[in-house]
Amino acid sequence: MPKFAANLTMLFNEVAFLDRFQAAAEAGFKGVEYLFPYAFDKNELAGRLQQHGLAQVLHNLPAGNWEGGERGIACHPDRVGEFQDGVGRAIDYATTLGCKQVNCLAGIAPAGADADEVRATFVDNLRFAAGQLKEAGIRLLVEPINTYDIPGFYLNRTAQAIALLDEVGSDNLFVQYDIYHAQRMEGELGNTIARYLPRIAHIQLADNPGRNEPGTGEINYPWLFRHIDGLGYDGWIGCEYKPAAGTAAGLGWIETLAG
């Protein structure tokens, strides 16, 4: 069975964020992830992890004004200084939390910006972040996200991500493969994971349509879990879905589909 991590941004919203660590542990999870830790004291978060025996599996680099609709700034030519400052902040948090990988959100391509400059900015930022994070013993991930949920998101296909990895040329840069986003943009899940597995450091899941728990949509998760196991993937799979009818009520899929 794969190792599942609870995404505390999406799951256990029935309780306050800091209480979700306990809820995840009581539900049987051994690892957690979430979008951003920066609104909370890093030592408080570390204490919750330790108290409940949880591993911090992943969080994102700072991504600009999230509440204002920004979804990352890594491809923004006029935000390079802010991006680099965010790398330092992410290292500070990840080190305290014992988190060994962080995800970089490319962002929505700036309107009217030169396409070559946008790509060059993203490549340069990834190269900078990968180097800084490597010195700290932390892997850098990049995640393709579908353009139905986030119109204009710059990085949206697996092959595009692999091409960026090749251009950056760092041994500390990997793909975060989100099954839900990949299904919406390109399908071909099994073959894509098999082809690029050495370059995939983290997987996330949700079903489609609806982005709810596995078993609620079109993705054949029992087959996909067996396939991922058979390929020898030993990383975490983040449960980044919207519970259809409450988190606890929907967790039965772990035993029925992945057991």
Image (spheres, grey):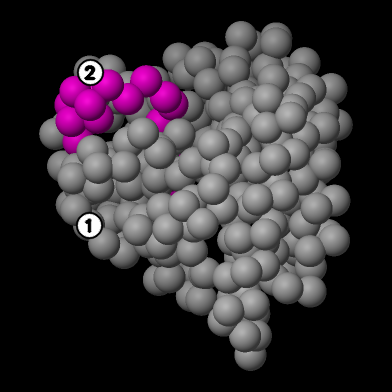
User: Which of these two is toward me, 121 or 100?
Assistant: 121
**Residue 55 lies in what quarter of the image?**
top right
Q: Nearer the viewer, residue 37 or 28?
A: 37
Using residue 123 as the reference point, say whether residue 246 is left or right of it: left
What is the crowding at mark 2: few (fewer than 14 residues within 10 Å), some, or many (at least 20)? few
- Note whether 141 is above or below 234 in the view shown: below
Badge 1 amino acid: Gly
Determine the secondary structure under disc 1: loop
Question: Which segment is the magenta one?
Answer: 224-243
Q: Residue at x 22, y 18 (%)?
A: 259
> Considering the image in quadrants, where does the N terminus appear?
top left
Q: Is residue 94 visible?
A: no
Residue 112 in the image: state x and y as whole percent.
63, 90
Q: At which x and y percent is residue 25?
A: 54, 16
In this view, the mark in front (1 or 2): 1
Label 1 Cα neighbours within 10 Å, binned few <14 / some 14-19 / many ≥20? some
Above-or-below relation of 143 to 92: below
Q: Given contact means CB atoms under 8 Å apart, are the residues at marks 1 and 2 in contact?
A: no
Q: Is residue 114 above or below residue 259?
A: below
Work out how far the residue at label 1 is from the one at label 2, CA to CA, in angstroms.
24 Å
What's the amino acid at mark 2? Gly
Residue assigned mark 1: 187
Say which residue appears at 77% left-offset and 57% top-offset: 83
Q: Earlier in the sequence, mark 1 or mark 2?
A: 1
Provide residue 186's location: percent of width, then percent of height.
Answer: 26, 62
Q: Position of residue 183 (x, y in %)?
A: 27, 56
Give the labeled residue for mark 2.
Answer: 259
Q: Is residue 240 magenta?
A: yes
* Left or right relative to 254: residue 175: right
Quadrant of residue 184 within the rendered picture: bottom left
Instruction: Reply yes or no: does residue 227 show up in magenta.
Output: yes
Compared across the picture, whether 63 is left or right of 40 comes to left
